[in-house]
Image (cartoon, coloured by chain):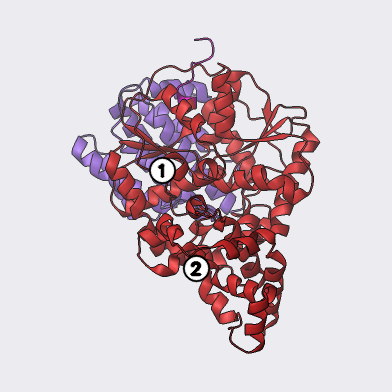
Chain colours: A purple, B red
Amino acid sequence: MSITHDKEFKLALASLPVERQRQVAVAFCRRVQDLSHDVRVKSALESAGRVDITEAELLMASHAAHAARVDSFAQCGRDVGWTAQAGHFVAKAAEVCVRIAVPGENIAWEAAMQTRLARTCQTVAEGLGTENTEAREQYRILENFLQS
Amino acid sequence: MSASLEKGVRVLKEVIDAPIASYFNSCVHCGLCAEACLFYTETGNPKYTPIHKLEPMRRLYEQEYTVLGRLKKVVGLSKPVTDAELGEWQELVYNSCTLCGRCSAVCPVGNDIVYMVRKFREGMSASGNAPEGIKGAANRTITIGSPMGVKLPAVKAQMKHVEKDFGIPIPMDVEGAEYMVMLSSMEIMNFPEYLGAIAKIMQHVGKTWTLCSTAFEATNAGMQIGNSDLARVIVSRIVEGAEKLKVKTVISPECGHAYTALRWEGANLMGRPFTFKVQHIIEVLGEFQELGLLKTEGFEKDRLTFHDPCQLARRGGVIQPQRNLMSMVAKNFVEMPDAGYMNWCCGGGGGASAIEEGEELRLEAFKVKKSQFETVKPDRVVTACANCRIVLEEGLEHYQMDLPVVGLTEMVADHLVEKGA
């Protein structure tokens, strides 16, 4: 299966059960993980990546990722640091990855969107503008995931 | 007297107008304003009594504009305002005042203490005594156009992102659109989903709308720091954009002070009436609801409460529309004590959240919100101000309360009946 646009990508993600969505969401996050230096984010993603994770563990990881997201908000009136903001969106994506989701939710799509925001912040920070290939990379990850 | 103090004192003398004079003369020293201020109630420290926060300005008023005060000054019985004193007062005028207006609401003689604090901030700002955090925001507003340094490419990047996420085009610079949507930097940076919600709602109700490339930022740092000239520049950018695009209504975002600056102060700052209407997004949604344009499906089942942003509810008088909207999408809605007009501030308004050194005090004052939440034990908190949202999340995190905070506009958008359904 070759994915070429977001509509197809979103539908393919939505068709996955929550547990599988979580796995692919973590794979999206791995690509931008280094943009966050928060150990809570790293730890949450490690937990989310485990196929045998329990609900209690998810809840604990969720608290940690939530705290990391809140700590990294751009504050009203303070200068926006694009690198820091990239970290914020990684934390937001990590929080999505460890959310105890109900069927019907598309957590993988949500994580994909947040990681794209993280990548955009990074390219802006590096003076490379807002164009990047994150979406295409995510299509490729999903294709491989579906084939595995 | 240093040059900066001289400038500050001159500005203070200029801003002491008839209302300020009458307010100082009317104060009966009852102390009710203290009980209304979260910084006083949560710390018990009398220095946070709202009227006390104006003491240097009161003395200056007395010394300059009353016979007895002038006499006292001549014979040396009245202490002059000094640089050191204004420096000391910075904490009282900025860090511990969110311009929430609760003190004005309870004053038995009708003194608008917020108005007085804002005038005092003019002098503080002119004398160089505004906090560094707010000064930085004001400088970025002048040089970049946004207090957080958000430029047009960042907005365009978010537009592109939202278009992909929601599958709806985001219009920019469309002449003749009915609505011009403003954003706050907070929404651009932290909550791009707000823009997606707007796109979804506008498509649903069939209204034309646009962003403006020369006036997308609604946050008014001039108002927060106490600089009318800067506040005017920011408002004039919006007015020029709205008039250039010939829109009928400018929508203020989920940002309290942006709304007050544009809706209630804007025309006065410009010295002329606007050619367009200004409404908060919640007022617009309320109108759509009244006209039967919002078709929703399903309800939030968990226990929800609403945090009223001070500038929207108390200073702006918008109290019922948000409740009507909540009833459209929530089955289990519960009001906090003091909700609506007398709601307690999140603790971060009026520029307070931009002041790093005020964080400890802000978290102390947050105990009043904590207590409100504990009384009704909601599962989630809904609000309509991006800054409130972040300050609430920080406070809840600090006190280890597991209570998600969500935006009302996004919640309404989530319940809209899909087109063609």
Which mark's residue is nearer the viewer, 1 or 2? 2
The chain holding disc 1 is A
Q: Badge 1, how many Cα within 10 Å: few under 14, some, many 20+?
A: many
SS at mark 1 in the image: helix
Q: Residue B116, image x and y in percent?
A: 60, 60
The reply, left or right, for residue B382 in relation to residue A135 is: left
SS at mark 2 in the image: helix
Q: Which residue is mark 2?
A: B52
| Amino acid type at mark 2 | His
The reply, left or right, for residue B418 in relation to residue B261 is: left
Q: Which residue sits at x=26%, y=43%?
A: A47
Q: Badge 2, how many Cα within 10 Å: few under 14, some, many 20+?
A: some
Q: Residue B143, image x and y in percent?
A: 70, 58
Q: Quadrant of the C terminus of chain A?
A: top left
Q: Quadrant of the N terminus of chain A?
A: top left
**Residue farthest top in this picture:** B420
| Amino acid type at mark 1 | Lys
Residue B41 vs B292, above or below: the answer is below
Determine which quarter of the picture holds residue A94.
Answer: top left
Q: Residue B287, image x and y in percent?
A: 58, 25
Question: Magenta residues?
Answer: B413-421
Q: CA distance from mark 1 to mark 2?
A: 42 Å
Q: Which residue sits at x=60%, y=70%?
A: B57
The chain holding disc 2 is B
The reply, left or right, for residue B177 in relation to residue B31 is: right
Q: Which residue sits at x=55%, y=64%?
A: B133
| Residue B135 is inside the magenta segment | no
